[in-house]
Amino acid sequence: MDLQTQTELEAAAFRRLLEHLRERTDVQNIDLMDLAGFCRNCLSKWYLAAAEEKGIEMDYDKAREYVYGMPYSEWKDKYQTGPKK
């Protein structure tokens, strides 16, 4: 497999992961952290780091908005259960 095809497949898998997490709003970040060792916020940080490596200007809030599919504060108000920090 050539590098371009591999990159396209990885990107498609990442987009599908985000879609899945956006659909599964019942799954809390703490659940993800306990079971998988990462959460939506981790994905946001990794996305931001990748943008920075490419010299793309972005902040953490924009990265979280991309991962969550909406502003984080909105997601938190709609879907976060338990104590809201």
Image: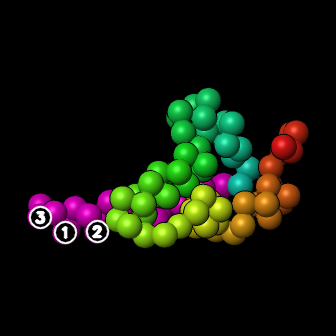
Question: Is residue 16 on the magenta stretch?
Answer: yes
Local secondary structure at mark 1: helix
Local secondary structure at mark 2: helix
Q: Is residue 12 visible?
A: no
- On the rendered structure, is 46 left or right of 10? right
The crowd level at tag 2 (other Cα within 10 Å; few <14, some 14-19, many 20+) is few
Give the total number of marks visible in the rendering: 3
- Residue 75 image-quadrant placement: bottom right
Residues drawn in magenta: 1-24
- Residue 3 image-quadrant placement: bottom left
Dominant SS in magenta:
helix
In the picture, the quarter occupied by the N terminus is: bottom left
Amino acid under label 3? Asp
Q: Position of residue 49 (x, y in %)?
A: 44, 54
Q: Residue 4 versus residue 27: which sits nearer the camera?
A: 4
Residue under circle 3? 2
Q: Residue 51 versus residue 10: which sits nearer the camera?
A: 51
In the rendered structure, are the residues bearing label 1 and label 2 in contact, judged by CB atoms less than 8 Å apart? yes
Q: N-terminal of the two: label 3 or label 2?
A: 3
The residues bearing labels 1 and 2 have C-alpha atoms spaced at a distance of: 6 Å
- On the rendered structure, is 46 left or right of 61? left
Amino acid under label 2? Glu
